[in-house]
Amino acid sequence: MKSESLVSITDYSKEEILEVLESARHFEENPNQKILEGKVVATLFFEPSTRTRLSFETAVTRLGGRIIGFSDASTTSSTKGETLNDTIKMVSNYVDLIIMRHYLDGAARYASEVSDKPIINAGDGANQHPSQTMLDLYSIYKTQGTLEGLNITMVGDLKYGRTVHSLIMAMSHFNPTFHFVAPEELKIPDDYKKFCESKGIKYFEHTEFSQEVINNADILYMTRVQRERFTDLMVYEKVKDVYVLKNSMLDNSKENLRILHPLPRVNEIAYDVDNNPKAYYFQQAKNGVYARQAIICKVLGIKI
Ligand code: CP
């Protein structure tokens, strides 16, 4: 198998997505395997992260590989003016795989074009977050028993939320119905609506986080309002607490409903939801290790 970067979830066909999910299941059953012995992986995080970096590093460690990298670009030569081009070319001399998060849309695609080693996009600006999508799909499959024909309700910052953007594209293989709940300022961008239309996917837009929309959902995908992406903080202040899910709002929800959130959470899910059996966001984050083990193997051309 050839080594290939994962920059956008659209780099993978439906069959490849299902193959990665099957490998994730394999790694959940047996997470400690010395598949990456002798391999070195770089984690280059130009933007803050807790889950993505630590779960990737756990995934590599459990597979017997070694990690180099940084979690704070202010300690690197980028502060001296070194370009992304030069940083990536340098690091690709040292390692077998680069996992990169960057604040600019398109940075991961650019890195994949200048690197002679595969790149995994760990989030680029408001654009894409494909490894999050793979763990989201794995979580949806585990909790629903299928990916087909689900009502997926996405709530919050649908404009800047890169996890939302990647998940829409991935779910398009599985005939979903989307409900997009967002204030006017954070509506889903037209490009994603056009994408749905081109694939014949049904979607509905709402500004009200109504009881009806909650009661019809199979998956409630809550998101944080992304303060770091606003150019006008007055707008952020206006919309930051626009939707808050409380436990009482789940009283008439479907039995199979699961609440997902890519995390970090700020105010959008009240703490009283955490003990509801329908809250799945912490298990979702745990699934990230298995999904990322599967992605790393696929990107390195290692057949499971
Ligand atoms: N979900 C996610 O990307 O979380 P981090 O920003 O903590 O990596």
Image: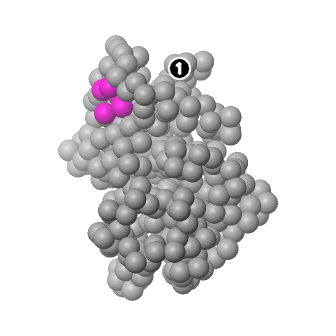
Q: Image quadrant for the N terminus?
A: top right
Outermost residue, top side:
38
Label 1 residue near ligand 1, CB within 8 Å: no
Q: Which amino acid, by three-letter code, is at mark 1?
A: Ile
Residue 265, x across and y down, in percent? 33, 64
In front of the other: 4 or 168? 168
- Compared across the picture, whether 80 is left or right of 265 comes to left
Magenta part mainly helix, strand or loop?
helix
Residue 268, x across and y down, in percent? 37, 72
Label 1: how many residues lie within 10 Å, few (<14), some (14-19) or many (20+)?
A: some
Residue 62 included in the magenta stretch of the image: yes
Residue 56 included in the magenta stretch of the image: no
Whether 6 is drawn above or below 106: the answer is above
- Compared across the picture, whether 41 is left or right of 169 comes to left
- The segment highlighted magenta reads 58-63
Quarter of the figure with residue 97? top left
Residue 18, x across and y down, in percent? 62, 36
The total number of labels drawn is 1
Whether 283 is drawn above or below 184: the answer is above
Quarter of the figure with residue 76? top left
Which residue is under mark 1? 304
Please report the residue visible at 37 percent of the width from the left and 19 percent of the height from the top.
33
Whether 44 is drawn above or below 200: the answer is above
Whether 272 is drawn above or below 57: the answer is below
In front of the other: 174 or 127? 174
In front of the other: 129 or 20? 20
Please report the residue visible at 63 percent of the width from the left and 76 percent of the height from the top.
205
Please report the residue visible at 32 percent of the width from the left and 62 percent of the height from the top.
275
Q: Is mark 1 on a helix, strand or loop?
A: loop
